[in-house]
Amino acid sequence: MIRVLIERHIAETLETAYEERSRLVLQQAVGAPGFISGEPLVDSHDPNHRITLANWRSEADWQRWFHSETRKNLMAELIPMMDQDEAITVLEQSPML
């Protein structure tokens, strides 16, 4: 299993529109092969800093979703609402020492 940390910063006044559209992205991801779970979070010190922590079966599953036409089309609606580029970090469990 891998975890994917997705960070977005929303432009002022677009929070409500962003929430509606980002919910659609997560709903579509739920149906993607390899998707396990996703948790949308808000930075307690910056309410426009949004984080999604998603669990995927494998990096190949994540990459397939990331490059899918479905995600590209949904992101085309989200990107104009962001005032910074989306940041994505793929994480895997560290081996025990």
Image (cartoon, rainbow, N blue to C red):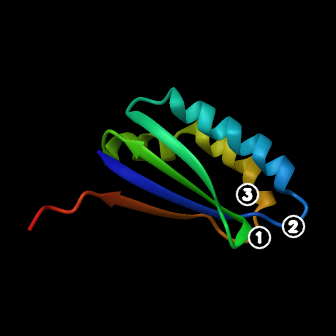
Task: Return the x and y of residue 38 as percentages of the image width and height.
Answer: 51, 42
Amino acid of disc 3: Ile
Is residue 67 visible to us here? no
Q: Dot 2: what SS? A: loop
Question: At 37% from the left edge and 33% from the top edge, which residue is drawn?
Answer: 34
Give the number of the mark in front: 2 or 1.
2
Marks 2 and 3: CB-CB under 8 Å? no
Residue 62 versus residue 13 in the image, above or below: above
Marks 2 and 1: CB-CB under 8 Å? yes
Residue 7 versus residue 59 in the image, above or below: below
Which residue has dot 1 on it? Answer: 83
Question: At 50% from the left edge and 47% from the top edge, which residue is drawn?
Answer: 66
Q: Which quarter of the rendered picture does the C terminus lie within?
A: bottom left
Decide which of 87, 63 is in the foreground and name it.
Answer: 87
Q: Earlier in the sequence, mark 2 or mark 3?
A: 2
Mark 2: few/some/many CA within 10 Å (<14, 14-19, 20+):
few
Residue 79's tag is 3
Q: Earlier in the sequence, mark 2 or mark 1?
A: 2
Decide which of 52, 42 is in the foreground and name it.
Answer: 42
Decide which of 35, 59 is in the foreground and name it.
Answer: 35
Which residue has dot 2 on it? Answer: 12
Amino acid of disc 1: Asp
Amino acid of disc 2: Glu
